[in-house]
């Protein structure tokens, strides 16, 4: 029998090593400024509690904290966590940042919002993670997502070189089919997020709201 949990842990272990190596530098390799899609939408929302999985070096978590949000973030990379906490201290804000595999976060803790930015997992792992993420949102809670589209495979401006790890609008709509999709679009935009996200990129952007009971 295919063990989704074991698959997730194996993938997390592999990526932990990859990301620790990438983040082990004084440079913030995806920049220290927040993702533009995240910034634009968060500025329209009333602060509350927010979950930021795969938070890397902390740029979005620090911005959210500066905007008055109570931030919980997690990632598999200890090097990413170190830099995130350093960035938070520099900006005189407090964030909670846990070291966790994607499928191990406590989805019984409820948040007002969640944000996913360029997080990529194998399909079976991704579907379970997205389901857990929905369960962690309160009724009416919002999720914001920007991620690389499958057409990004032909570009060198960032993202995985494996099409299975990239997204389509249909996959996101299916994964979040129990939520109200407020916005879902594929756009080509210029990335300027540190040395690894540079140039024209094809991304999928989604805003979805958890349906009220």
Image: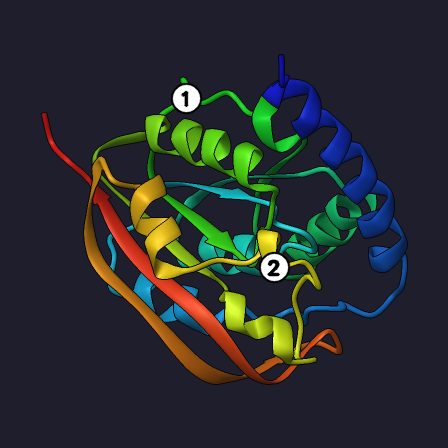
**88 or 149, which is in the foreground?**
149
Q: Which residue is mark 1?
A: 109
- Residue at figure coordinates x 45%, y 73% from the top left: 36
The 10 Å Cα crowd at callout 2, few under 14, some 14 to 19, many 20 or more, is some
Q: Position of residue 189 (x, y in %)?
A: 47, 84
Question: Is any part of residue 54 visible from this angle?
Answer: yes
Question: Can you tell which of label 2 and label 1 is closer to the viewer?
Answer: 2
Dot 1 falls on a residue whose secondary structure is: loop
Task: Specify whether 91 is left or right of 45.
Answer: right
Rendered view: 186 above or below 208: below
| Identity of the residue furthest to the top in this view | 1
Q: Which residue is mark 2?
A: 163
The answer to which image quadrant residue 101 occupies is top right
**39 or 54, which is in the foreground?**
54
Rendered view: 4 above or below 176: above
- Residue at figure coordinates x 49%, y 66% from the top left: 149
| Identity of the residue furthest to the left in this view | 213
Q: Position of residue 58 (x, y in %)?
A: 63, 54
Question: Where does the N terminus fall, quadrant-wise?
Answer: top right
Task: Specify whether 95 is left or right of 189.
Answer: right
**205 or 106, which is in the foreground?**
205
Dot 2 falls on a residue whose secondary structure is: helix
Question: Is any part of residue 48 visible from this angle?
Answer: no
Alpha-carbon span between mark 2 and mark 1: 32 Å
Of the numbered discs in the image, which one, if any, rests on residue 141? none
Question: Where does the C terminus fall, quadrant-wise?
Answer: top left
Residues marked 2 and 1 touching at CB (< 8 Å): no
Answer with mark 2 or mark 1, whichever residue precedes in sequence: 1
């Amino acid at each position: 029998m295919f063990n989704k949990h074991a698959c997730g842990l194996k993938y997390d272990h592999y990526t932990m090593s990859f990301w620790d190596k990438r983040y082990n530098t004084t440079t913030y390799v995806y920049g220290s400024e927040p993702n533009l899609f995240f910034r634009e939408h968060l500025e329209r929302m009333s602060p509350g509690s927010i979950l930021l999985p795969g938070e890397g070096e902390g740029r979005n978590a620090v911005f959210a904290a500066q905007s008055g949000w109570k931030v919980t973030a997690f990632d598999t990379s200890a090097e990413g966590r170190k830099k995130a906490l350093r960035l938070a201290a520099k900006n005189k804000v407090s964030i909670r940042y846990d070291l966790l595999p994607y499928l191990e976060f406590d989805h019984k803790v409820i948040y007002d919002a969640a944000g996913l930015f360029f997080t990529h997992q194998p399909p079976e792992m991704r579907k379970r993670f997205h389901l857990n993420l929905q369960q962690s949102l309160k009724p009416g809670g919002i999720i914001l997502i920007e991620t690389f589209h499958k057409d990004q495979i032909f570009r060198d401006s960032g993202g995985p070189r494996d099409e299975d790890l990239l997204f389509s609008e249909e996959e996101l709509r299916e994964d979040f089919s129990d939520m109200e999709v407020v916005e879902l679009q594929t756009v080509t935009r210029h990335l300027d997020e540190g040395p690894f996200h540079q140039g024209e990129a094809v991304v999928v952007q989604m805003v979805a709201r958890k349906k009220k009971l």
